[in-house]
Amino acid sequence: MSNAMMGPVLAQVGLTLVTLLVLYARRVPAMVAAKPTNEVMQDRQSLQALPAPARFAAENYNHQFEAPVLFYVMCIGAMVAGLVSEAALLLAWTYVGLRVLHTAIHVTYNRVLHRFSVFLVSSIVLIALFVVLAMQYWGL
């Protein structure tokens, strides 16, 4: 079971790569149509003029490097320290599932309340993963 956490880690990495593909599929055509100058491309505010689907894909890709970084650290740390348990594995898979749902909402209809609700639950799961691993580490 020591390497079982690689499944959720690989799934989360896979989600990040899928969001990268969605980003390219939406942003490149939008940029080609907009024909921005170099100066415009360097101004973050002017990129707000791109169509919403292109902006949402870029935002979601950036989100994959925020809270999921803690997820990666905890999962890899759990494998290295031999702290992988059924509870930790269940929480890890739950976290990834919620991140998939968050991404699906963000890059489709993007209802902020729905997206935030999923983000909130995924944050609670991430905290629970931390608590489980910390308790196992300290033998509690």
Image (cartoon, helix red, strand yellow):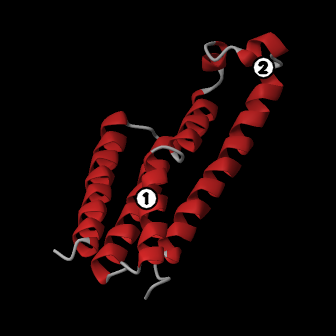
| The image quarter in which residue 53 lies | top right
* Cα distance in 3D space between marks 2 and 1: 37 Å
Please determine whether, in this image, residue 70 is positioned above or below residue 27: below
The residue that mark 2 highlights is: 34
Q: Is residue 121 left or right of residue 75?
A: left
Decide which of tag 2 and tag 1 comes sooner along the chain.
2
The C terminus, quarter of image: bottom left
Q: Is residue 45 left or right of residue 102?
A: right
Q: Residues within 10 Å of mark 1 (few under 14, many from 20)?
A: many
Percent x, y of residue 64: 53, 47
| The image quarter in which residue 124 lies | bottom left
Residue 37 appears in view: no
Q: Residues within 10 Å of mark 2 (few under 14, many from 20)?
A: few
Residue lying furthest bottom? 1
Q: Is residue 71 left or right of residue 22?
A: left
- Say which residue appears at 73% left-offset and 43% top-offset: 24
The residue that mark 1 highlights is: 71
Please determine whether, in this image, residue 78 is positioned above or below residue 24: below
- Say which residue appears at 36% left-offset and 35% top-offset: 112
* Secondary structure category for the residue under label 2: helix
Percent x, y of residue 133: 30, 69
Q: Amino acid at mark 1?
A: Phe
Q: Using the image as rendered, state which of residue 123 and residue 27 is in the foreground.
A: 123
The N terminus, quarter of image: bottom left
- Say which residue appears at 57% left-offset and 59% top-offset: 15
* Secondary structure category for the residue under label 1: helix
Q: Using the image as rendered, state which of residue 65 and residue 55 is in the foreground.
A: 65
Q: Amino acid at mark 2?
A: Ala
| The image quarter in which residue 55 lies | top right
